[in-house]
Image: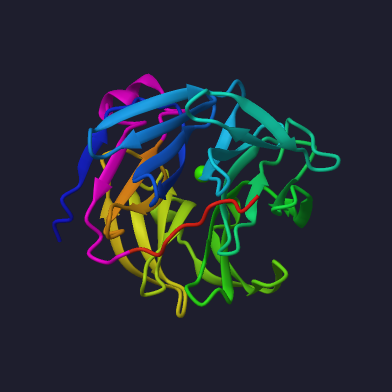
Amino acid sequence: MNNELRLILDAHSICGEGAIWDEKNRKLYWVDNHLGFVHVYDPETNRDRAIDVGQPVGTVVPRESGGLMLAVRDGFMSLDEMTRKTRLLAVPEGHNPENRFNDGKCDPAGRFWAGTLETPTHKGCLFRLDKDLLVHRMLDNIRCSNGIVWSADNKTMYYIDTPTMRIDAFDYDLKTGTISNRRAVVSVAGEHGQPDGMAIDIEGKLWVAHWDGCCVCRWDPTNGNLIQKVRLPVSRPTSCAFAGQNLDTLYVTSASAGLDAVALAKQPKAGGLFQFNPRVRGLTSFSFAG
Ligand code: CA
């Protein structure tokens, strides 16, 4: 099947991450995690602007009160994309900056969920930042916190801790922001690479970027089946997001981190931003309500 895969930005990012579409401003936000850049891509002009936020940044979400919210090395930070002013708004209790923040997204009520990475001595966690700027520790013993999305009925949260090679589901209580009944819904065979960032479509299927898998896969969480595999000319796709006026384009970030000269010569577009036509629309992503 021809999905019309296109390289949109030959960005050469070290670790592109955290893609999210802002419907209000019609812009795609993404980050270069290790370099500490927030990128603002405008599909209308094909222009991309990078903002240095001074420390590694795992993900970005729009903020209802204006500007952006970030999960950075030290905690949760606000960013005014016009003035480039940043402000650290919340640091989880006992958070060790070495367990820097990685991927995250907002739930349909505007709570910002983001998780951290393990170090050789300390496991990571999954945190929830509420609109009152209080942080709640929701999961412990996380190794590499990545994709997170909610079902259209708000009753299920899907989550990826990459080294588990699974997509897990939780029952979700939107009123309280609590999770329960963790179970695996997809087990990823090693040949596909490791599950990383994730998006969800209107049919409830999960689109996952597969690190070291050269692909984005569409998974069915009701039976664990692989529905579709879209190959990319880079080995390390990292995140994906539905974008555009009809949420009918899938953007994919990628990484060049950790690739040696031989690997980079074989995949000169590593670190680029790609798009393709998934032939299904995505669900809306949410802004931080605080
Ligand atoms: Ca990731």
Residue positioned 36% across, 59% down in the render: 217
Residue 84: where, in percent of width, then height?
53, 23
**How is the rendered protein coloured?**
rainbow
Identify the residue at the far right of this view: 94
Q: Main secondary structure of the magenta part?
A: loop
Judge from the rendering whether residue 76 lies leftward or rightward of residue 199; answer left or right: right
- Identity of the residue drawn at 67% across and 32% down: 73
Residue 91 appears in view? yes
Residue found at x 60% / y 58%: 110
Classify residue 65 as left or right of residue 280: right
Viewer-proximal residue, 132 or 30?
132
Query: Whole-percent x and y of residue 59?
Result: 54, 41
Which quadrant does the N terminus fall into?
Answer: bottom left
The answer to if 1 sits in the magenta stretch is: no
The percent position of residue 131, horizontal first and vertical second, equals: 69, 53
Query: Horizontally, is 96 left or right of 198 in the view?
Result: right
- Towards the viewer: 217 or 159: 159
The magenta region covers 255-281
| Quarter of the figure with residue 2 | bottom left
Q: Is residue 275 on the magenta stretch?
A: yes
| In the displayed structure image, the side of residue 101 where residue 33 appears, left or right | left
Number of disc labels: 0
Residue 7: x and y in percent read: 23, 37
Q: Is residue 177 above or below residue 181?
A: above
- Above or below — where is 143 with respect to 270? below
Residue 263 is at least partly visible in this image: no
Question: Measured along the vertical axis of the image, is residue 225 above or below residue 99?
Answer: below
